[in-house]
Amino acid sequence: MIERLQVSHLRNLSQVNLQTAACNVIIGANGSGKTSLLEAIFLLSRGKSFRHSQPKRYVQHHQPAAIVHAELTDGSTLAIQKQTDATTVLRLNQTTVYNQSILTEQLPTLLIDPSTMDMLEQGSASRRQLLDWLVFHMKQGFHPQWVAYQRLLKQRNSLLKQTKHLSQSQHAELKAWDKGLASHAALIHHYRVRIFEAWQPYFEESIQQLLPSYAQQLSLSYNAGYDASIPLDEQLAERLTQDLQLGYTRIGSHRADIHVHWRSENNSQSVTDTAMEKESPSDKVVKLPTIKEQAANILSRGEKKLLITALRLSQLPLLLSSSELLNSTEGAGAAQISNHANATPVVLLDDITAELDDRAIDILLSTLAQLPCQVIMTSLTADVLPLIDKYWSTSNVFHVKHGVLSPY
């Protein structure tokens, strides 16, 4: 958990020094800098902004770099410096490190903000990242496999873009890459499936709270991005001609997805059959087929917001659950739970009152208050404070104006 946060030259936050508690509320008008504070924490944890991919968009004008530094309650310190040319410096306990994953393990962050409320209609990337965030923090072996897979995929796609006809040596090289991709994909799929199966009951419980009338209709499914029953390299070989024409790899772990399905009720329709009526006066009961389609096509915008909130909210109790729960799903010799699986997550809530109704906000906050996580939220007004007082005995409340924070 963050104990103290320092932010320098990120958007309109010139110099911020913040003492944090388990629950923190930042109140301010649009453009005041409250979302930028969440962006800074996300940047420290993930190495990237959730608003813009280019550092020059968030590094303060006329400044060479933005810096975020945090002291955690366990005594460790984390820091990131992002320069306008995207050069990055990372430090853990004053020592330079070279992999963002090291800081990510120390500071897991979960973001719920208006920009995530359209993930059901967007491409698969945001939904895939939803699962991979859990897998990263709960399975030690996942990240190295994912990095190696991405490296091979980049090499393969680069070759596919260069030519439509492979030479003999290029074909041999591609075949070796495909073997490697298949090996990494199998392990990535293994990790994803184990965590997805553990996630399911938490999602169902969260849906029961937020969308109880639809609990029987909504279900979650995982798609591997390829036929996981067949080695990926065999499938890539079959599709090579098409991949060469398109210039990229169309199937694999990088195309995995999470789907939320809507299943219609098993309706029974009573009909009278003339021929049968001659034999019996009773009606014939016909079972209509169950209709299964994307929940995004059925739910209203307000219901989609609740569904996405359920997806994110259900991840926290799983992440915080004891390692024994997950170890019970593993076979002998399987990868162990990450040592950082129990790191205190920081939940970032950006202007939730603008996206969720009072009932949903109440459920969200009451759930968070019962979990050992740190909450940092923003709000346009102080209307949310009575709910904060209801669930947290103490909280830090700040007001931000023109990038300057002060006690509320």
Image (spheres, helix red, strand yellow):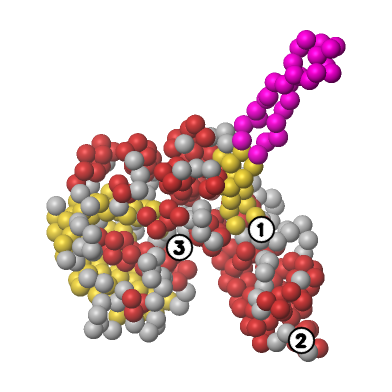
Q: Secondary structure at mark 2?
A: loop
Q: Quadrant of the N terminus?
A: bottom left
For disc 1, the marked residue is: 224
Q: Earlier in the sequence, mark 3 or mark 2?
A: 3
Q: Residues within 10 Å of mark 2 (few under 14, many from 20)?
A: some
| Residue 41: percent from left, percent from top | 33, 63
**Furthest residue to the top?**
281
Residue 111 falls inside the magenta stretch: no
Residue in front for this viewpoint, 294 or 381: 294
Amino acid found under the numbered disc labelled 2? Leu
Cα separation, mark 3 vs mark 2, equals: 41 Å
Marks 2/1 in contact by CB < 8 Å: the verdict is no
For disc 2, the marked residue is: 166
Q: Earlier in the sequence, mark 2 or mark 1?
A: 2
Mark 3 against mark 1, which lies toward the viewer? 1
Q: Is 213 rendered above or below residue 233?
A: above
